[in-house]
Each structure stands twice: as structure tokens, then as C-alpha cells.
Image: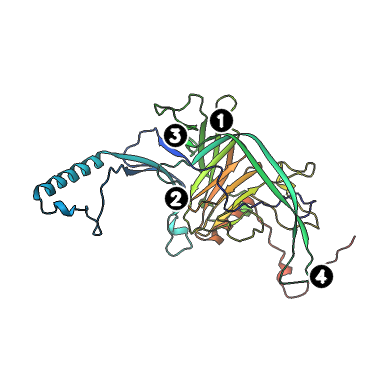
Amino acid sequence: ASSSSTGLPISLRRKAVSTVKPGRLFLRKQILGDAITFRLGEFSIGIALTDYREEHNHGSEKNGNGGPEVDKNTAADAKSQKQKRQQQSQQSSNNKNNVTKLPSLIIQHIPDITNSSASHPRNKTVWSSRPGINFVGAASLSSLSISESTAANSGNKSRPTAAAATYNKTHVQENFTRQYTIQTIDAIERGPVNVITFTGRLAHELNVTGEMDPQSPHYSLAFQMEYGQSQENHYNGKKKALSFHLQVWGGPEGHAVNQSHIFLHTPPDEAFFGFGHRLGSPNAKGSEVHVLHRGMSSPHGYAGKPSSCQHSISSSSSCAIPQFVTSTGRALFLHNYEPSVFDLRSPTWLGIRTHTSYAKGVLIGGESILDALQIYTSIRGRTKPLPGWTQRNGVILGVQGG
């Protein structure tokens, strides 16, 4: 894009050490059974508990057949073999007593079979976490440095006559003073207006007794159904969209929260498309994508209105937006105007950081990429269909002058 463009290009950094990683998750709310689930429209929102057994195989070995390794010098000693079997039985009993329940988030879209276009619609997971791994976090930043540099593009190598071009590359440097990657779930409630809310605390470490700092930040994560903006944008798959609102507040003096984080589990083979920009590769998996805009009155900053994402005639036709759709048919987009970072460098998790203490967005559970995009445009708006006369045979001429 040219320097006059108001939509900053995306800066990609591959194979770098992640600055923010998921941490730990603790459930401090008692639940009956191994799960607690709420239904919200066609979505299921809940916490599942998974058994984690602490194995104590101190020095024990396995042979090629999967059984315990037997010392050849004592193989004939029946008494020794009996003692080993007793020890193994005792060890198995100890393992059963050392079972820890690890919580995990799971949000699924459960399609209405009567309204589904698929012959065999399946439940689609739109947001989940691995057992014991947090899905909400936060950080305190001392500063956020945004700078630009000009680089040269050699042009189209397949066309030797293609002219070289210059473009602006944006660099974002986050300077953390503290990261809150330990999450607790203290309450899960259904509100009077059909809102499911998770509340709890965040911490950067635990003391020797396993407790948090009393001044640790609080968080609230609320979910409710998302609908289209108007009847004109109505799409009968609108029940497949779920809005979320994360709010984080508090923190010790000098370490107040000014950045919010969410983490989502992702299969290694899931591909990510979108972000409103022509990336080096169509699949953004393996990259860290920075999304930010600038207004006409300042070299960089926040896009105060969607209309500030404009382009001059000489600029490129791309505009960075905090939205993606994946090969599984799920999609996510943020309502935030503040700069955001989508960290897709890990094969098993996705991290989204917004440079403010809250994050608002929408989750979509489509049956395909096309279905997800139709739901997305039904919410964000669509271009009106062209007049009927444009669809008839003929030639359309346009004149442009100055």
C-alpha cells in the first residue's frame, strides 16, 4: 500500500519465540458430575472435567511386549515374581487415588437438523481449551511501540518488465511488565436476558500455599446469541452466531491490566484464512498477524470508525480486519477498533491479544467456509444486489474524468 493509505499492511513474523503462551486453569466452582453445560440457541456452552492420573513409575521399565521388564537373574525366583506383582498392584491402587480433575472449556454449535442444508450436519466446536489450560488471560504493558519502515518489492518475477514497488511495513513491539496466565473459574451463571457469564480471577503466579495475590485482576466473560443488523441482512443461519464480551479489571499498583487475551485450541491441520489482507500464503497458520488501522489525522493509532478504513486511488485494495474463517467452517471476528494480535504460530493453540482491557467479538459455527461467510455478512452487512438491468445481455460502459 502507498503511504497515503489509511489501512496499514500486516506485519508477519514467522518462526519466532512466542511472547505470550497459555498458562493454567483452575475450577473453583463445585459442579455435579464431570461437566456443566448450558444451552443458548443452537449452542452448547460448558466446562468438562477430564481425569489426569499422576503416574509414579520410578525406575520401572517396559519390555517389547508392553509388560514389566523382568530381571533375568531372578526370573526363576517365584518369590521375587510374587513380590513384584504385589508392588505393581499397590502402585495401580495408588494411581487410582491420585486422580486430578482438569477443567476445559467447550463451546459447540449443535445444528438444527430441520434447517440444516447439510445431509448429515455435525456438532462443530467453535471454542475449546485443552484440559487444565486457560482460555482467558491478560497483561500489563508499559508501552506499545508502532513503527513503519519502507521496503522494496521486486515486482512480478514472471514478468521481467513489471515495475518494482515500495510498500510500508508495520512493526509492533509489545513491552510487557506482567502477564496474567493463571485463570480461575469461580462462577458460571445464566442471566435473566439469556446470557451465560463466566467470572473468576487471573494471576501471574501462585504463592507457596497455592493462593493468588488478593489484588489479582478479575474477569467476566459473557456469551449471548448474535443476530443480523436488519431484515435486509437476514440469513436463516443466523442462529449459528454467538457473541462474546470479555472484560478484565484490576491488578496490583503498577501492573493494572491494559491488554486482554483469549486462547483457543486448534487442530494442527486447521487452516486459517481472512484478515482482509493479501498474505504471503493464503493460510495464516504459522504466522503472527498484527491488525491495526490509522486515521487520516495521525500517522498511526486506532480506527475510530469503520469508515476510516479507506484507500486512495493509488493504494492497494486491502484493509486489515480482525476476522478469520477456518477450513473447518468456524469463524471469529472482533468488534474492537484497538490494535489486536492473532498469534497462529503454535500448531495446537491460537492466541488473540487486544490492546485494551476488553474484547468483544462473534463466534460462527458454519457447515462450510461458504456458510460461515454468509453468516458473517448477514451480521456485518452485505452489498446490495445490482439492479436487474445489469444482469441482462449487453455492454456496460463507464466514463471517468477529472
In the rendered structure, which disc, 4 or 3, sits on the residue that comes first in sequence?
3
Report the Cα–Cα distance between label 1 and label 2: 28 Å
Q: Are marks 1 and 3 in contact (CB under 8 Å)?
A: no
Q: Are marks 1 and 2 in contact (CB under 8 Å)?
A: no
Residue sitting nearer the eye, 91 or 169 = 91
In the rendered structure, which disc, 3 or 2, sits on the residue that comes first in sequence?
2
Disc 3 residue crowd, few under 14, some 14–19, many 20+, Cα 10 Å = many
Report the Cα–Cα distance between label 4 and label 3: 63 Å
Mark 4 residue element: loop
In the rendered structure, which disc, 1 or 2, sits on the residue that comes first in sequence?
2
Q: Could you tell me if residue 95 is visible in this image?
A: yes
Q: Is 314 on the left or on the right of 206, as rendered?
A: right
Residue beneath label 2, please?
Answer: 108
Q: What is the number of the mark on residue 184?
A: 3
Report the Cα–Cα distance between label 1 and label 4: 57 Å
In the rendered structure, which disc, 4 or 2, sits on the residue that comes first in sequence?
2
Three-letter code, disc 1 = Trp
Residue beneath label 4, please?
Answer: 397
Mark 1 residue element: strand
